[in-house]
Each structure stands twice: as C-alpha cells, then as structure tokens.
Amino acid sequence: MIVSGCWQAPLAPIPCRYGKDLREKVISHFDKHPLWARKKKDYKLWREAVLILEVARHRKTSLFAGQGLTLEEEQRLYAIKDEMAQRLSNRKKQDYELRRLKKTGKEVRDV
C-alpha cells in the first residue's frame, strides 16, 4: 500500500521521508523481498530514479541551485519516466483486452 509516497503495512505505518528513509526502509525491504512479474521491472526503474535523485540532492551546493542533476542523470530520469509510461500504457491495453474478452465470453488467451 502506498500512502503519501511511503510504503506501509495495512495496520503498521512506517513513517519515512524522501532520501535516506526511502533507501533504508523501502528499497532495502524490496531488495530483500523482491516483487514478481510486472512490478519487478517497475520497481527496478523506480529504485534507479530514487538513487539518482538522492545522489543529486547531496551534490546540490545551495538552496537555489536546482536539483543538482548532471545532464546524463537528467536524461536517464526522462528515459525512466518514458519507459514507465510506456509500460503503463501497455498494461492498460492488456487489461482492456482481457475485460473485453471476458465480456464477450470468448476464451481468454494469454495477452
């Protein structure tokens, strides 16, 4: 369950802030207990983005210096964003196809 950017068990919230808490609590949890199937690739992309942003945040020299991203890091973040958006779009297409097949009563094939 995701609540305001942090993972929590249904009855045991884990308070966390961006950066160190995400790395130590969320990332360490999912590194120890990997996700399966579709979410595994999404998690790896998200993890890479979080680690890039954390490194950039520590590189930032002043409050007004922006994110402190190098050009390569910024390009990689855009590539991650595009890949995740494409995966979501493909997933929505697959889910739509499955719902359509179920409604028509046709045999559901591996979409």
Image (cartoon, grey):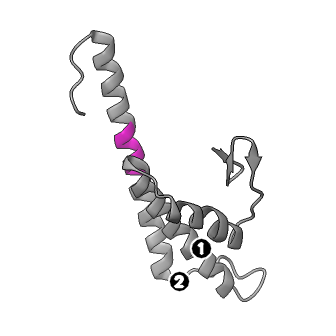
Mark in the foreground, 2 or 1: 1
Dominant SS in magenta: helix
Residue 11's spot in the image, x, y percent? Answer: 74, 41
In the picture, the disc for residue 5 is: none
Residue in the image at 65% along x and 76% along y: 67
Q: Secondary structure at mark 1?
A: helix
> For residue 92, what is the image quadrant?
top left
The reply, left or right, for residue 61 in relation to residue 28 is: right
- How many marks the image carries: the answer is 2
Q: Quadrant of the N terminus?
A: top right
Q: What amino acid is found at the position of numbered circle 1 in the picture?
A: Leu
Residue in the image at 75% along x and 64% along y: 17
Q: Tell me if residue 87 is in the magenta stretch.
A: yes
Q: Nearer the viewer, residue 20 or 10?
A: 10
Q: Which residues are magenta?
A: 84-91
Q: Quadrant of the C terminus?
A: top left
Q: Nearer the viewer, residue 17 or 86?
A: 17
Residue 84's spot in the image, x, y percent? Answer: 43, 54
**Contact flag, marks 2 and 1 (Cβ < 8 Å):** no
Q: Is residue 11 above or below residue 106?
A: below
The residue wearing badge 2 is: 70
Q: What amino acid is found at the position of numbered circle 2 in the picture?
A: Thr
Residue 105's spot in the image, x, y percent? Answer: 26, 10
In the picture, the disc for residue 53 is: 1
Residue in the image at 45% along x and 63% along y: 45
Q: Tell me if residue 96 is in the magenta stretch.
A: no
**How far apart in space, not on screen, are marks 2 and 1 (Cα)?**
11 Å
Q: Secondary structure at mark 2?
A: loop
Q: Is residue 66 above or below residue 85?
A: below
